[in-house]
Amino acid sequence: MAGLLWGLVPALFSGVLPHLLDRWVKGHRPEAEPGSGKPTVLVVGSAASLICGLIIIVAYAAPRPVIACAAGLFAILIAVAIASQWRSPTGERVGWNVSVHAATSAGAAAICWVEFGVAAGLLAGILATAVALSRVLVRSLTRGQDGHTGVEALIGALVGAAVCGLIYLLLR
């Protein structure tokens, strides 16, 4: 039961609250062009939420794997934000709308591989692939108004697995 409770805090601060913020931003930003990147308020708000969650689990001495997982998710957010918000010297946005969904699911798959072995990692990798493909399908179904290109989903998955896997290995 304690493990479930420890998992709820990072889930709330890295999943539920950023998702609610994303829904709110989309409702107040209807003029945004498809592929225009993540709004700054969403990136900053999500980062603040993840930091609050990290502070809580560190302050209450959560098990190291829980802290490592939450730190990995925070690192994914930073990496995706950099890739998505990249600007040229003239101020033109040159970054991609990298898929956070693909990144976090691939990061979770990397953690499963490290923590539970190859079989669990492969199963989680299959699920992460399904998540990435679903983001591409959403783009198709919404005629480019939501979702991601295949490249954006692939980059998200690669960044997520590498960044989250490395952070998890270093901190667990």
Image (spheres, rainbow, N blue to C red):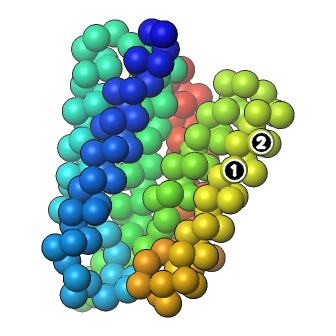
Residue drawn at point x = 69 percent, y = 58 percent: 129
Task: Say whether residue 103 is left or right of residue 97.
Answer: right
Decide: few, some or many residues near mark 1? Use Cα within 10 Å; few <14, some 14-19, many ≥20: some
Residue drawn at point x = 55 percent, y = 83 percent: 141
Residue drawn at point x = 72 percent, y = 25 percent: 116
Whole-percent x, y for residue 4 in the image:
47, 18
Please give the label number shown on residue 123: 2
The image quarter containing residue 26 is bottom left
Decide: few, some or many residues near mark 2? Use Cα within 10 Å; few <14, some 14-19, many ≥20: some
**Pick the front one: 114 or 124:** 124
Tell me if label 2 and label 1 are in contact, CB under 8 Å. Answer: yes
Asked which secondary structure carries label 1, the reply is helix
Q: Which residue type does callout 1 highlight?
A: Leu
Q: Is residue 89 above or below residue 60?
A: below
Q: Which residue type does callout 2 highlight?
A: Leu
Please give the label number shown on residue 103: none
Task: Say whether residue 160 is left or right of residue 14.
Answer: right
Mark 1 — residue?
Answer: 127
Q: Is residue 148 above or below residue 109?
A: below
